[in-house]
Image (cartoon, rainbow, N blue to C red):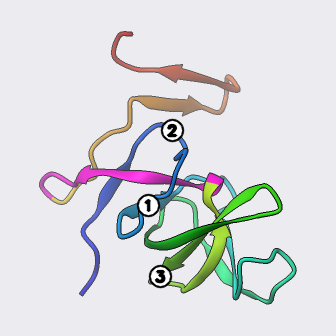
Amino acid sequence: EAAPETAPTDAAPTDAAPGAAYVVRGGRGALVRSAPDTTSDVVGILPHGSTCRLVDATEVTGAIRARVSAPLAGWASLKLFTKAGPPAVGGRPVASPLVKLDWFGADYGGGGG
């Protein structure tokens, strides 16, 4: 069964939450490898915005590597993910408060604060 649609929160995780849903925030996606080591075989790439489940995490040479499952199973850099927000409402993801306006090359936060 497919995971429910989720919206990302606006910050990269500072620690892993095994069992939680995460969204790929890396602009080029997340490179998934067969083992935590960055020299291990490439399994594939999770596209930007895709959702996966975090299974485990470990530190490798100062970086946190996350073991993810479905749609690809393997290891990727935790900094390329953000913990998923609340489930979608009415089949649509909940809007993120940060919008990137590429034609200006700047980020503009929404909604006060």
Instruction: Name the residue at 71% across, 77% down.
Output: 36
Q: Is residue 8 above or below residue 71?
A: above
Q: Which quarter shows the C terminus?
A: top left
Q: Is the C-beta separation of discs 1 and 2 under 8 Å?
A: no
Q: Is residue 78 left or right of residue 90?
A: right
- The secondary structure type at the circle numbered 3 is strand
Instruction: Name the residue at 53% across, 20% down.
Output: 108
- The secondary structure type at the circle numbered 1 is strand
Residue at image mark 3: 69
Sooner in the amino-acid sequence: mark 1 or mark 2:
2
Sooner in the amino-acid sequence: mark 1 or mark 3:
1
* 9 and 38: which is toward the camera: 38
Determine the residue located farthest toward the left in the rendered image. 90
Residue at image mark 2: 11
Q: Is the C-beta separation of discs 1 and 3 under 8 Å?
A: no
Residue range of the region highlighted in magenta in the rendering: 79-90
Q: Position of residue 96 (x, y in %)?
A: 38, 37
Q: Is residue 33 above or below residue 104?
A: below
Q: Position of residue 41 (x, y in %)?
A: 80, 89
Amino acid at the residue labelled 3: Ser
Q: Which quarter shows the N terminus?
A: bottom left
Q: Is residue 10 above or below residue 33?
A: above
The answer to which quarter of the image holds residue 32 is bottom right
Distance between the alpha carbons at the discs numbered 1 and 3: 10 Å
Q: Position of residue 17 (x, y in %)?
A: 42, 59
Q: Is residue 95 left or right of residue 107?
A: left
Residue at image mark 1: 22
Distance between the alpha carbons at the discs numbered 1 and 2: 11 Å
